[in-house]
Amino acid sequence: MGRDPEADYYQAVEEAFVSRRGDPLFLSNADWLLIRKWRRAGLPLRVVLRGIADALDGHAHSFSRDRKVRSLHYCAGEVEAAAERWQRALAGGAEGPGSLSFLADLARRLEEAPLGAAGHKVAVRIAEDLRGLEGGSLAEQSTALAAAEAKLVRALEKDLGEAALARIEAESEAVLAPYRTRLPEKVLAQVKEESHARRVLEGHGLPRLSLFHAPEDPVAP
């Protein structure tokens, strides 16, 4: 049946935290919602895992090391610190190439993709908009990309037709079935939404429109 990258994000965070914590207890609903917050903020998995590792490494060398870490929220501060380093690199400082090359490549792919009439019209307009984001902040770029992706997915859905959309929906439902009893409703809804968008875009040879998928860059100090 295959795996779902969106669900894998949550599972990878859970496995990293539980294994380092050395306790078989599963995550609480509050923990799952925290992961959802990180995902919605566009934090790549490697950034979140670095923050978790930093937090638990610090705990292992602290005076309270004999106390078990009970909640993923313990790692929130270090995840935020890792996110700030990633954002600085993405902004084009000395630590990384910046987001502009990613946006330029994304614009090119949108223009060159073999799309239907509705999708092509929207994709060309989005490509023009992306090239106008050069002076924008990362927050502005992320917001613009999210809005653009939603528009593009709706246009591509029109080109796909009902039968193809029903097949995509069935595939998503089947792959995500094992998570229904584990994830809170809000988290599962987020996973389903992102999984659907990815499948629609992949069906046209396109990536997600998000800085989440920008090239690898350093997250260490």
Image (cartoon, rainbow, N blue to C red):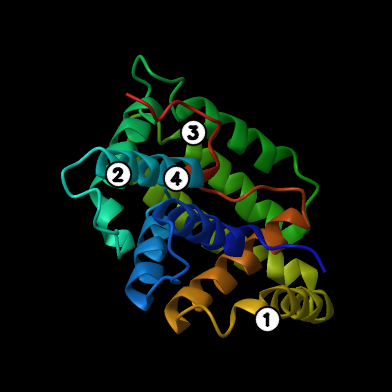
Q: Secondary structure at mark 4?
A: helix
Q: Residue at x 40, y 30 (%)?
A: 219
**First of labels 3, 4 by sequence position:** 4
Q: Secondary structure at mark 1?
A: helix
Front position among marks 2 and 4: 2
The answer to whether 49 appears left or right of 214 in the picture is: left
Circle 2: residue type? Ala
Tell me the quarter of the image containing the C terminus.
Answer: top left
Label 2: how many Cα within 10 Å (few below 14, some 14–19, many 20+): some
Task: Point out residue 80 in the picture as x, y percentages from the top left corner.
Answer: 27, 45
Task: Point out residue 25 in the picture as x, y percentages from the top left corner.
Answer: 43, 71
- Residue 49's disc is 4
Circle 4: residue type? Leu
**First of labels 1, 4 by sequence position:** 4
Circle 3: residue type? Arg
- Residue 131's disc is 3
Q: Secondary structure at mark 2?
A: helix
Q: Which residue is mark 2?
A: 55
Q: Up-down: is 196 above or below 47?
A: below
Front position among marks 1 and 3: 1
**First of labels 3, 2 by sequence position:** 2
Q: Residue at x 77, y 80 (%)?
A: 170
Real-space Cα separation, disc 3 to disc 2, in angstroms = 38 Å
Query: Hey, which quadrant is residue 82 in on the image?
Result: top left
Real-space Cα separation, disc 3 to disc 4, in angstroms = 32 Å
Residue lying at the far left of the rendered structure: 63
Real-space Cα separation, disc 2 to disc 4, in angstroms = 10 Å
Q: Up-down: is 190 above or below 211?
A: below
Q: Which residue is mark 1?
A: 177
Q: Secondary structure at mark 3?
A: helix
Q: Up-down: is 139 above or below 151?
A: above
Real-space Cα separation, disc 1 to disc 3, in angstroms = 39 Å
